[in-house]
Image (cartoon, coloured by chain):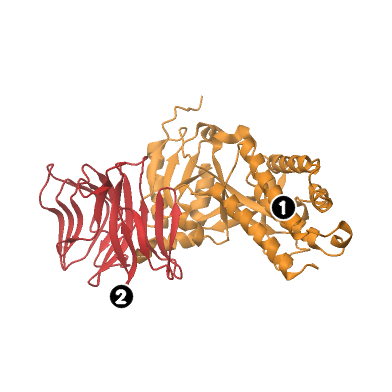
Amino acid sequence: MTSNTVGDYIARIGGIIYKNVENPILFNETPVLGLTRDISNGELNVTLDLKDENGRRIATITNGKVMEIDSGKYIVIEGKDRFAVVDKTSGRIWADIRKRIKDEIYELDISCLLIIAGVPIILHPNRTKIGKMNDNEPPNISSLTLSTQNPGTGSAIHLKSSSLYIIDVAIEHFKSGIVIEA
Amino acid sequence: MNISDAQRLFIDQVVREISEEWLKHHLPIPNVFYHYTSAEGLLGILSSKSIWMTELRYMNDMSELQYAKDKISSRLLIYMENRDINDIQKEFLKRIVSAFDPFSSGNAVFSASFCESGNLLSQWRAYRGKGGGYAIGFDFLHTIRFLSKRCVLRKVIYDKQTQDNVVDGVIEKYLSAIAKETTGRTMSNINQDDYVPAVCQAFSGTAGELMFSFKHPDFHEEREWRLVHSMNINPRFNRSGEFPAFRSYDGNVIPYFSVSFSNAVEASKEDSFGCPFPIVKLFIGPTINADLNTESVKYLLSNLNPDATTDIHKSDIPLRWL
């Protein structure tokens, strides 16, 4: 039994801390991933669709479980309260999810590679890059907490046909974290 | 060896089944493995992007392998006294009890030690005499695939009962395989082929795995895991193999291999590869000037990858110089 009302939460997504942000990342007004909470055990989970560069489905992750996977090309590697979806040939890690985290300020850690309408949304374990990759440029925003009143409105970062690299950033209480308009 | 294809397949199947059962003891792997080291060790590891794996017999506690060897021998002796086993099974036990140790024939295990905990008093005490210590927290879920040598991670088993159960399970599996494969045959025609020697060789391989994963229960607090690379280092038998490097320590000549995690560092720089920086956490020991060293360690790590986001913690254990 899951609920889309996750209540108070802290999650790390693409190396960025999101605290009580209703929609961490929106692309053209649609959430790129969903957070849910398991009512029976209180566990915070993620729901997302992984697709490759050509829009072919790699795997579907629903409430923190891999429900469908193209098992010819991809494999699920498991750790302790953790799983990763990995390309068998290249070793590329399409998603790496850690849940039930007890020894950090966050309870869920999500990293994944998303390409939506040709726009790369790189939620790397250590950093978030949107609209660009492997540019070896310094970050646009780093070592910063973006916070507003609780409950907040509006978005912390709004991108309109532009790119972004953020690292060591926390976003708190906004209705939306990063809003991308392509 | 003079055994039939069917016998070979049968032995392989037994080894596979034992291996599957054995691997359950080592799963799931923790998300962080801590390697305790001195300041010199930290600098060496970070500057070379590699870890030294020492031949297990030369590690701090040289009695470790002997403990495991004694454990396996003692369980084999118990089975030898069992009257319910047949002559062929008895012959198998008789042969392996004195010859199961794979390390006596040039096979070697190179290992680096890791802890599940990054802030252990016993470990900090060990490094106090060297000015203080650091615990480097590696995320091996992905990093292990990028290491320069094929390695496995093994959890050290300290519990005596578990050790006994594991060894008994292995012995029984081999005994029942022998019984199944040799039904209707006698010792005289068994001796004409190499079936029993082939099973003995398979057992020796299994015993090797157990030997580097068993440790005396008194060490249980360490919660040790081992990154292990096994190979035959005897050039007489392994002419094309890679040979270890050697270093000296307290008058001893010690074989070791350096295993590089450089490829994992490079992969972590690639945005679209999804690979985390291999060092996810680092504890600074209680006897070190933590504030100053937090900064220098951050510099060191960002030198490997400017986008590294390693969590650096200061140990809060009240251990001081005096």
Q: Which mark is residue B152?
A: none
- Is residue B307 in sight in this rendering? no
Q: List x then y, in percent, for residue A159.
A: 16, 62
Q: Position of residue B14 (x, y in %)?
A: 66, 58
B15 vs A54: above or below: above
| Viewer-nearest residue: A169 or B23 | B23
**Badge number at residue B176:** 1
Residue ID at (73%, 57%): B180
Chain B palette colour: orange
Q: Position of residue A105 (x, y in %)?
A: 31, 41
Chain for disc number 2: A
**Pointer 2 residue:** A54
* Disc 1 crowd, CA 10 A, few/some/many (<14, 14-19, 20+): some
Chain under callout 1: B
Q: Amino acid at mark 2?
A: Asn
Q: Looking at this rendering, what residue extends furthest in the bottom direction? A: A54
- Residue B197: x and y, percent? 80, 59
Would you identify the image quadrant in which residue A100 lies? top left
Q: Is residue B231 left or right of residue A116?
A: right
Viewer-nearest residue: A57 or B230: A57
Image quadrant for the N terminus of chain B? bottom right
- Compared to residue B163, the image places residue B176 above or below, namely below
Residue B205 location, quadrant:
bottom right
Q: Is residue B257 left or right of residue A39?
A: right
Residue closest to the far left:
A153
Q: Nearer the viewer, residue B213 or B283?
A: B213
Instruction: Mark yes or no: residue B179 visible.
Output: yes
